[in-house]
Image (cartoon, rainbow, N blue to C red):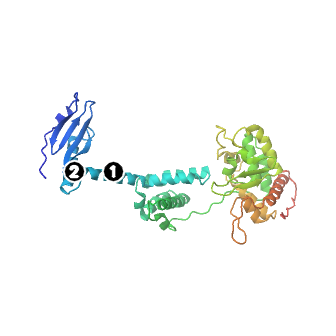
Amino acid sequence: MTRATNKLSATAVRNAKPKEKAYKLSDGGGMYLEITPSGGTYWRLKYRFNGKEKRLALGIYPETTLAQARERREDARRQLAQGIDPSAAKQAERRASKVAAANTLNAVATEWLAVHKDKVVHDHYRHDKRRLELHLLPVLGNRVLSEITAPELLDCLRKIEKQGKLETAKRVRTLASMIFRYAIATERADRDPAADLKGALKSPQTKHHPAITEPDEIAKLMRAIYAYSGEPVTLAALKLSALVFVRPGELRRAEWDAINLEEATWKFTPSKNGPPLIVPLASQAIEVLTDLHDLTGRSRYVFPGARSRERPMSENAITAAMAGMGYKGRMTAHGFRAMARTVLEERLNFPPAHIEQQLAHVVRDANGRAYNRTAFLEQRRAMLQAWADYLDALRDGVQNVVPIRGQV
């Protein structure tokens, strides 16, 4: 391979101006600068491979300097000396880069999130996406997913732990595992390194949602709720939180189309990939909803947001109302579930299976099969009516409320 003669100077290149027709300034070794009438300046390399004359693009001036173009020319000449076609090698590199870009953790996580979005409720999806964007993707997102090792992933999770976010670290590990399994299914990975990290993270202490379960305290809580002087929509949400004790997110996203006031039922899907749950509505719940319908019945949501009726109520609305009533740290929106779960079984003697069904937990029969969430409907209807009556009795100060035998 003969040595290339460098004929051009940086000044000559800088002073090259467009002409009526395209022209070339040769630098030697097959390299030249092509100047087009429109002012384009392109570095090219002319060479022969297997007897055929070919062209290789070396860059655009001034983004690619004269010195950089010469380096690329020499790289191409070395490839030719080894019997490699520089153009074919460049195309192969581009294809490999494109494949690698499609196989990064960022790319695969984006695909997986699109699938995940249709399987879970919106708040669940939003929180998962946020965790990935905050903790995993900034660190490992640009890496080819199949090349990420368990120690690298553990190092990322340890950083979350050092912030005191033990539960978040465990959740991010679970999310990473789900993404790796998706990559395996789509033939972009062979194994899941997140699975190797089971037991490697610190276990967070279990935190229970604050809940009130003593009758005297429940009576005070119900009186505080009915004395609430804030927004009528928030008041209705507080009342229904106690009456139906569904998850706070499920209540906030309740839609009028799913509620049948005549049949006294509310039908919704607790999670997008699960069976629907039918919530029988006690007469007190129907009264609350009937009054509320005059305010929000034209909206999609039973509890529309304060800023936009096209969105559900803020997840902080009930929490803020509870705090304003003096129950900060003592009771939460989620605490109504624990309150009902405890009192219905321990004081009102209802069967745990009926309670768990109403809580939208998985309930199994004697053979280990999960009940459909429409099961125990009439039993749950009687249970919820008894529960509403019990709450009314406590609120009204009825002394020595007789425990209801849950024979339904």
Residue 314 image offset from top left, x and y in percent: 64, 44
| Quarter location, residue 371 | bottom right
**What residue is rendered at 83% in x and 50% in y?**
283
Label 2 packing within 10 angstroms: few (<14), some (14-19), many (20+): many
Residue 256 seen in the current view = yes
Q: What residue type is labelled 2?
A: Ala
| Quarter location, residue 154 | bottom left
Residue 74 seen in the current view = no
Residue 372 image offset from top left, x and y in percent: 71, 61
- Give the secondary structure at mark 2: helix
Q: In this view, does 260 lie to the left or right of 107?
A: right
Tag on residue 94? 1
Residue 192 image offset from top left, x and y in percent: 47, 64
Q: Would you place residue 279 above or below residue 369 in this image?
A: above
Q: What residue type is labelled 1?
A: Arg
Q: Would you place residue 38 above or below residue 67 in this image?
A: above
Contact (Cβ within 8 Å) of mark 1 with mark 2: no
Residue 358 image offset from top left, x and y in percent: 74, 58
Badge 2 is on which residue?
76
Mark 1 or mark 2: name the one nearer the start of the chain.
2
Q: Nearer the viewer, residue 110 or 36?
A: 36
Give the CA separation, mark 1 to mark 2.
16 Å
